Amino acid sequence: MRAVCNILILLSLLSLGACESALLREGPAPVADTPVPVSRSTSDDPAEVLGAFIAAWNREDFEAMYRLIAERSRELYPQRNFIDKYTVAHSVVRFSGVEHSLLGVAYQGTTAIVDYDAVIKSPTFGNVADERRVMRMVNESGWKIAWSPTDIIRGMSSRARLTERADFPARADINAADGSPLAEEDAPVYSLWAIQADMPNIDHCLDTLALVTRESILTLRRLFVQYLDETYFHVAEIDNDQYERHQQQLATDCAIFPSDGIFNKARVYRSRSYYGHGIATHVVGYLGAVPADELERWEALGYSGGDLVGRAGIELSYEQVLAGRPQRYLRIVEGGSTVIRELAGALGEAPRSVTLTIDRELQGIMAQALADAVSYATPNWGVLTGGGALVALDVNSGALLAMASYPSFDPHTFNPATEYNVREAVTRLNGDVRNPFANKALAEQYTPGSVYKIVTALAAGSEGIWDRATQFDCGHFWDGSRYGDSQATRTDWRLLETPRREPAGMVTMAQALAASCNPFFYEMGALMYQASPDMQIGYARRLGLGAQTGIRGLGIEAAGNVAPPGEIAAAINNAIGQGNVTVTVLQMAQVTAAIANGGTLWQPYVVSHVGAEGEPGYQLENEPTVVSELELDAEAVVIVQNGMCQVTTVRDLGTASFVFEDADYTLCGKTGTAETAANPHAWFVAYWPREEPQIAFAGVMTHSREGSEVVAPLIRRTLDDYLGEPRAAFPEWWQEPYVPVKTQAQALAELAAESQSQ
């Protein structure tokens, strides 16, 4: 594909007219052909004129160069034409400067012949030697240059043009940990088309397309309503594996299948293909043409305007590894093909594959779980959410096993070979308020809510703020006035439920974590602030919060925020993960992994190696690296672990026990529901299995409902599918109308109203 694009560019250059550049006339406004003031005297020394011309050339001051040429040359080459010729030549050679050395000057009456050597500098071709150049000058009350195109590079003329040819090698693949491809070069891509009148049941087809493309039902409905029943329209593009997996459903439910003729509904072309319809788009990235506003930067790396380059993720960060470097040839040609002169060449470099730590099966399961959940919950929170993310880390190495962000987008969209209407597709993606381009696991930070209580419990237990075995009475209300709290009354989340749930009652520290008892953690926040205002924040920072994890290759990473509280009320808010605390999903997965393994903070990484082991060019990129041994209080860690394990196993007490009570495996987790100005963010973090943990999970679904109601079922679906266990159904109430989660203020107002009515 790159070769085709490059050939088209070269053909465009070859088609330029002798006196003007159509290419440049269509771009920025050219310099007007206004009369150029004639300098009656330049210099009595032709060598000085040459030096001035070369100096202006280095500055790319074409107007100054033009003022040094003779009147007859101006008649033959108007200023616009002169500047066009240099502009085109510079773009081809990627001009970065020129040097010259004078060989001699010969005089013949009113003319002079200047012999000199030149070296044109290029970041692509290095130093292009142009020896034994001859510049002719005429004396017009001072020496002027009798300019022609050969003064750009020897051999150029009105019929000969400077061209570049690049032989691009095939781009290397991006592989999952087991060597299976996530991005594969020269693979089949199926372009799906549809006619609604041909579908046996449009609703069934929408369900199938939502499964195949991981688009929401609403997005697909909006697409369908744009077309009449008999209209043949483009739906999506999917890779060969995805097509083969769902071929029968597409044919049965949507009447989408290959056929002869112009109404073929499963058209195939070969290009770079992304496995599973891009199950890891925010990790792997995608290709696109060099953007016009970045052309200069890419040209400095040896690319041309029509080349395809990585635009995000691994495709971008490992561009020069995956693409290698093409072998390039700089030539002067005549008539489009006759080579007049070979000027320079640049050796290429073989592309090398990039192997990630991603578990392809787990990645696909996670991406599908997110999409299925939002589509299924469309009558409820699915239509309200701003999207979400799931992350899985290796507990004992920091290797990123999966990272799925929703909503996503089809990475084929930006490939010139695509059959998408690219302008419409990009407009739709840019107009999506959920921001599909953002990696919600890494680039966005959120209030964590009660998943942050892991940090608070660890700090309080380690510092002896609360005796680990002493029970606390967890009621509906907590009064912090004795600590100087500015908020008159704070409530437990159970008071916000409909109907109200009974208080948790007497609980130990581990049980308080399992029950997510707000009053207990209010108390811990106040006591820690009294002992040391920065105590709680200190543990958060030790666990990696408030700073980027440092994972490389995935683009922008948010740092989160764990600023010290300025007053006790802020410390109390922070203790339950509200207030000034914000985190990323990846950070919470890292925290969960550190709790699971007993206190080792591993550096997250996603790239394992480049090239094939045992072959030239192989390079190990990352290996397990310990950020720090946290040296946490061992008993406090055990208390937090026990509390997390009770979350999923102790009926009525554990906030997610109802989600996992019938599972054939054990995991330990923590739910979170973070209040926002709109609907709450749902959180769940967990590690699996309970004994000898292997994987740490973290997930968020923004503006939805409670963590136990939304993200815990997503982790349940993920593990059911990954472990091959019977799949638990999503909650039936997701199909019912949305009921907002009460805020503390609403719950207190309801109580006050009830009290007045009695």
Image (cartoon, grey):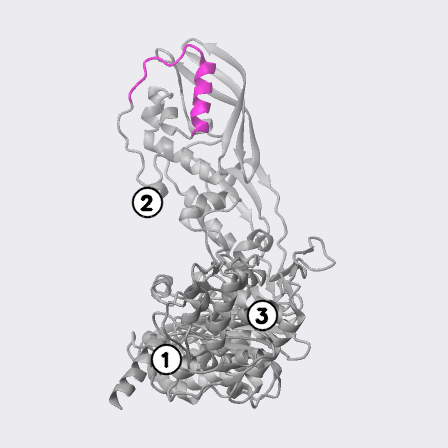
For the residue carrying disc 2, how many other residues have a C-alpha within 10 Å: few (<14), some (14-19), or many (20+)? few
Residue annotated with mark 1: 741
565 displayed left or right of 666: left
In this view, the mark in front (2 or 1): 1
Q: Is residue 296 above or below residue 269?
A: above
Q: Residue at x 39, y 78 (%)?
A: 382
Residue annotated with mark 2: 26
Looking at the rendered structure, the kind of residue marked 1 is Val
Q: Element under label 1?
A: loop
The residue lying toward the viewer, choosing from 117 and 444, is: 444
Verify CB contact (< 8 Å) between mark 3 and mark 1.
no
In this view, the mark in front (3 or 1): 3
Q: Element under label 2?
A: loop
Chain part drawn in magenta? 37-59
186 displayed left or right of 482: right
Q: Position of residue 106 (x, y in %)?
A: 50, 12
Q: How many marks?
A: 3
Residue annotated with mark 3: 458
Q: Position of residue 426 (x, y in %)?
A: 37, 62
Magenta-span inclusion, residue 181? no
